[in-house]
């Protein structure tokens, strides 16, 4: 047992070091390649040039990505958390629960490009929404729904049952227990799942190509408009070849930093809320 424990411990530390090393190398490599193109003008101006994006900046792509992500999070997170609550606290049939899990697993297995094609056919063409942020947001929301639902359900199941039973013992309803105990007690896990889902949506190029992302547009003012997006802009820059690679690396680094900063800020906020609730 001693040798096995040592081997497992070494394996765990080596794996952790490899993961951290890969992440640091990835950030460092992309930063070094794109640092020459990152500036305030790059972050605050629109793309310009004979070849689009070879000059100017990526500001409309940043704001567009934020719009796409927020729309997807609203559309995907609300039904995902509601489904998790229903499965854990209201569903009395194991067959129905298994059916719900089967549907969630099926949705999780759909390729993102197929979801983009579905959203294009139904919302862009048949329902005449047009190419817009809402059409993309629906496709992205469906894509991240299983991601959020699984994590929300896990968080609800891990909440100590004694806390919920204590609320019932006071004569309170199940809905009151959910609002006052379950949701506040799982706020950290729920926020983490929602933000990770949002980051997943932010980097999904395929659904955006079909439904709402365009090569050039001003910063969006409505979800019924098309918009630029960082992953779409990055794809176009790389497709243009060597002249735009510096801008492509700069765009990639900005997108990675937006995702990283979002995760850090929301994690800090969620932990503070959790500590305040525990008190």
Image (tube, rainbow, N blue to C red):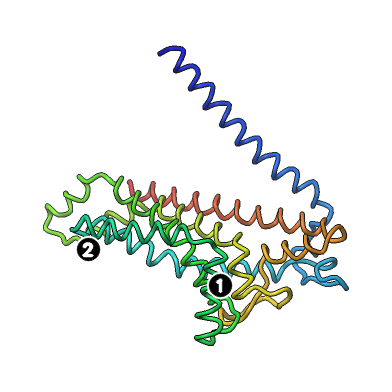
Question: Quarter of the image holding residue 128?
Answer: bottom right
**Could you say whether the residue bearing mark 1 is in a helix, strand or loop?**
helix
Which one is in front, 179 or 114?
114
Viewport quadrant of the N terminus: top left
Total count of labels: 2
Q: CA separation, marks 1 and 2?
A: 38 Å
> Which mark is in front, 1 or 2?
1
Q: Residue 276: percent from the left, percent from the top?
A: 37, 50
Rendered residue at 77%/54% (across/down): 249
Which one is in front, 107 or 213?
107
Q: Residue 245, labelled with which disc?
A: none
**Could you say whether the residue bearing mark 2 is in a helix, strand or loop?**
helix
Q: In the rendered view, does 142 fall on the left or right side of 46?
A: left
Q: Residue 261: percent from the left, percent from the top?
A: 60, 53
Q: In the rendered view, does 106 fall on the left or right side of 99?
A: right
Determine crowd level at label 1: few under 14, some 14-19, many 20+ residues with C-alpha closer than 10 A: some
Which one is in front, 110 or 226?
110
Q: Mark 1 = which residue?
A: 117
Determine crowd level at label 2: few under 14, some 14-19, many 20+ residues with C-alpha closer than 10 A: few
Whether 268 is drawn above or below 103: the answer is above
Question: Quarter of the image holding residue 234?
Answer: bottom right
Q: Residue 171: percent from the left, percent from the top?
A: 11, 58
Q: Mark 2 = which residue?
A: 175
Q: Residue 75: percent from the left, percent from the top?
A: 45, 70
Which one is in front, 66 or 274?
66
């Amino acid at each position: 047992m001693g040798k096995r424990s040592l081997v497992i411990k070494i394996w765990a530390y080596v794996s952790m070091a490899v993961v951290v090393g890969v992440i640091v190398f990835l950030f460092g490599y992309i930063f070094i390649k794109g640092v020459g193109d990152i500036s305030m003008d790059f972050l605050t101006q629109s793309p310009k040039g004979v070849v689009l994006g070879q000059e100017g900046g990526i500001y409309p792509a940043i704001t567009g990505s934020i719009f796409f992500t927020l729309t997807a999070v609203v559309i995907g997170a609300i039904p995902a958390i509601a489904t998790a609550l229903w499965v854990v606290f209201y569903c009395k049939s194991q067959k129905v629960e298994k059916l719900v899990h089967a549907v969630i697993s099926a949705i999780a297995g759909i390729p993102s490009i197929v979801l983009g094609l579905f959203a294009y056919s139904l919302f862009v063409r048949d329902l005449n929404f047009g190419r817009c942020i809402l059409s993309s947001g629906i496709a992205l929301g469906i894509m991240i729904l299983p991601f959020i639902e699984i994590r929300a359900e896990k968080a609800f199941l891990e909440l100590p049952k004694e806390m919920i039973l204590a609320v019932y013992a006071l004569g309170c309803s199940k809905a009151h227990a959910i609002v006052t105990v379950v949701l506040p007690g799982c706020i950290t896990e729920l926020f983490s799942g929602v933000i990770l889902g949002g980051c997943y949506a932010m980097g999904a190029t395929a659904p955006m190509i079909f439904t709402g992302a365009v090569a050039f547009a001003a910063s969006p003012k409505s979800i019924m408009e098309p918009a630029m997006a960082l992953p779409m802009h990055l794809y176009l820059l790389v497709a243009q070849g060597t002249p735009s690679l510096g801008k492509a690396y700069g765009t990639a680094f900005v997108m990675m930093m937006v995702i990283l900063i979002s995760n850090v800020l929301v994690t800090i906020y969620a932990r503070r809320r959790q500590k305040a609730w525990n008190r």
